[in-house]
Image: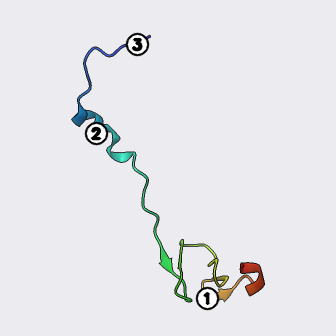
Amino acid sequence: MAVPNRKISKSRKGMRRAHDHVPVPSVVLCSCGEPTLPHRICPSCGTYRGRQMLRKDDAE
């Protein structure tokens, strides 16, 4: 099994892991005021780009 010749420092380990974080999702406000993910139907009112996609009883 391969064994490293030298110890990896905490700084170098941290620099390698700097891009491994989970990105913060972008959020847009629907016309009803609820925060939703972009390019998705609003789960509370059922609208997408100003059009009614789901009826009120389907959204719940």
Question: What residue is disc 1 on?
Answer: 50
| CA distance separating discs 2 and 3 | 22 Å
Q: Nearer the viewer, mark 1 or mark 3?
A: 3
Q: Secondary structure at mark 3?
A: loop
47 relative to 26, above or below = below
Q: Is residue 1 left or right of residue 56?
A: left
Q: Which mark is residue 2?
A: 3
Q: Which mark is on residue 12? A: none
Identify the image quadrant of the N terminus.
top left
Q: Which residue is located at x 32 percent, y 38 percent?
A: 16
Q: Residues within 10 Å of mark 2 (few under 14, many from 20)?
A: few
Res. 46 image quadrant: bottom right
Give whichever of discs 1 and 3 has the lower sequence position.
Answer: 3
**Amino acid type, label 2:** Gly
Question: Is residue 23 placed above or below 34 in the rendered structure?
Answer: above
Q: Which residue is mark 2?
A: 14
Which residue: 72% across, 79% down? 60
- Secondary element under disc 2, as helix, strand or loop, is helix
Three-letter code, disc 3: Ala
